[in-house]
Amino acid sequence: MASKSEREYFSSLADLGCILCRRLGYGESPAQIHHIRRYGGKRDNAPVIPLCPEHHTGNTGVHGLGAKAFEKTYNLTQMELWEESEKLLHEKREANKLFG
Ligand SMILES: [Zn+2]
Ligand SMILES: [Zn+2]
């Protein structure tokens, strides 16, 4: 069961929109939370990224293609997407501090 701060983190992450759509220039697509589980760690500690339903579980998504083919198809790694989403989240927080 996710804690309150975890839920807040997940929802602000999802609010960024799909990180892959953003990268591909498709704009902001409503996103779900994907756990990156490639390093064999526990799900609780897994890095998470926002992905739209298609890029998450669709035919062109990380679960549809499998992690390896997904990264090859888009020429990136899930950890790169994670770094990008963390950066966006940080920028958003800083902006909120200034204006909110
Ligand atoms: Zn997407
Ligand atoms: Zn997933």
Image: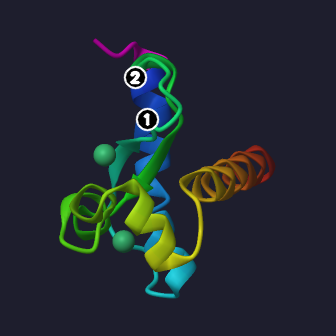
Q: In this picture, which residue range is highlighted in magenta?
A: 1-5
Percent across and percent down for residue 7 are: 39, 27
Percent across and percent down for residue 42 are: 44, 17
Q: Quadrant of the N terminus?
A: top left
Tag 2 residue: 43
Q: Earlier in the sequence, mark 2 or mark 1?
A: 1
Residue placed furthest toward the bottom: 25
Residue 78 versus residue 76 in the image, above or below: above
Q: Is residue 3 magenta?
A: yes
Residue 97 shown left or right of residue 88 in the figure = right
Q: Which residue is located at x 80 percent, y 50 percent?
A: 98
Q: How many marks?
A: 2
Using a 10 Å C-alpha cutoff, classify the residue at mark 1 as few (fewer than 14 neighbours), some (14 to 19) or many (20 or more). some
Numbered mark located on residue 37 in the image: 1
Q: Are marks 2 and 1 in contact (CB under 8 Å)?
A: yes
- Kind of residue sitting beneath label 1: Arg
Residue 40 versus residue 53 in the image, above or below: above
